[in-house]
Amino acid sequence: MPAKGDLMGAGTLQKTLGIVIIWLIALGCGLDQTTSTQTEPPSSTATATVVPTVVPAPLPPSKASRIGDRNMSVFRGRGPSWSPDGTKISFSTTGTQLPYPNNAAIYVISPDGSSETRLTNPDNGRCITGIANMECISHSSPTWSPDGTKIAFVSERYVAQAKDVVHTSDIFVMNSNGSKQTNLTRDTTYVDKYGQIKGLSPDGKSLTTGVHHKNPKWSPDGTKIAFQTNRSDGADEHAKINWEIYVMDTDGSKPKYGANLINLTDNTNASSNQRADDQCPSWSPNGETIVYVSEGTDSQEQPGSQTDIWTMNFDGSGKTKIFSDALGNWCPTWAPDGLTLGFVARPNTAPGATPKPQQLYLVPLGFKSDWVVTWAWTSNLKIGDVATYSWSSDGKRLALGAEGIFIVDVKY
């Protein structure tokens, strides 16, 4: 027979467990009904308070490991993109020949610096100053399809036309081994054979504005690519070149790749001459949302105004500004778990002072604007300006495009 003290202990334990169970039930109800309006008088019985969870901020990296050495193309590589299986990183090199940045090509390499392989070889046989049919080509911005079988990239061209040089760019897709390179965006209904937007008049002195398609990003299911473009599909927009965000089909079910182009932002108002310049789209891991930057300028403002970070639904609806400050926020992307947002920005510098290096910011959900502007995730790394970055599929590492390509660990 249990002792009296044991019975009292068991009774106390049962009472405690009962309170815990009631507390857990209250907590669960609170989670399910956080958006409901209370219609009954509050009970005199104490209930648990639900405290919103704030995702912890990633710890600043202690070091960055540079890929390759001076004898490799990756040493001057730019725009890294991690393959879905984590075994390769694609990148482009910066061309060194003059007069235009030409002959940049797409490569892949293992994260440990081995097996560097060239995938594209732009034909620059006509990239000669002074000839009438000059054409210089450069490949950049590679990005992997979710299944790792294809790579989308940007092909830029500088083409001689009379007294002008037309600068234009298109989005291509190729197999992951570099084969079957296909142009997704060239359409002669809105550009001439040189890639110049129809309706613009060359001035004979400056670089003529050509049509551009940049920053391709695959949807998580691999059926679409979001990108930015200054193409003008309406005749009344020819004089108001403006960055918009489009999506196009890439699943091959249409008559050709790049079919079904849809303008998601449609930010030019021809009657008021307003523009927003929406750029750098990136999909959320679940494919439901696209994050991007919007400059928000109009015809009266000076160049270099601030950019804000926005989100919208995959169909272009529900546009919402989520972050705004004096930084030049650029190219936001989510971490693979969807809990951290990254973007590139240059910290504020006092007038007359030397500009600080451009940094990568990693912002956890639940962040406060007045906190994040004071904290650059890569500020203690001496790697130069961070221009681009790519998450590994497990979210544990980042490849940084700076003065070369670097890998850093992500820890919390």
Image (spheres, grey):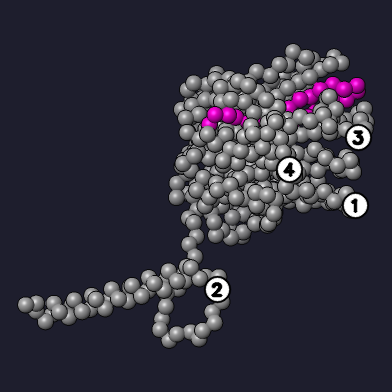
**Helix, strand or loop status at disc 1:** loop
The label nearer to you, 3 versus 2, is 2
- What is the spatial separation of the Cα atoms under label 2 and label 1, in whole angstroms? 43 Å
Q: Earlier in the sequence, mark 4 or mark 1?
A: 4
Relative to the observer, which residue lies in front, 346 or 195? 195
Q: Which mark is residue 199?
A: 3
Q: Earlier in the sequence, mark 3 or mark 2?
A: 2
- What is the spatial separation of the Cα atoms under label 2 and label 4, in whole angstroms? 37 Å
Residue 242 horizontal/vertical position (percent): 81, 43
Q: Earlier in the sequence, mark 3 or mark 4?
A: 3
Q: What's the magenta bit mostly, secondary-structure-wise?
A: strand
Relative to the observer, which residue lies in front, 132 or 306? 132
Residue 154 included in the magenta stretch of the image: yes
**Amino acid type at image mark 2:** Ser
Residue 120 horizontal/vertical position (percent): 63, 20
The residue that label 4 is drawn on is 262
The label nearer to you, 2 versus 1, is 2
- What is the spatial separation of the Cα atoms under label 3 and label 1, in whole angstroms? 18 Å
Within 10 angstroms of label 1, few (less than 14), some, or many (20 or more) residues? Answer: few
Q: Residue at x 84, y 32 (%)?
A: 189
**Amino acid type at image mark 1:** Ser
Question: Where does the magenta region start and end?
Answer: 148-169
- What is the spatial separation of the Cα atoms under label 4 and label 1, in whole angstroms? 22 Å
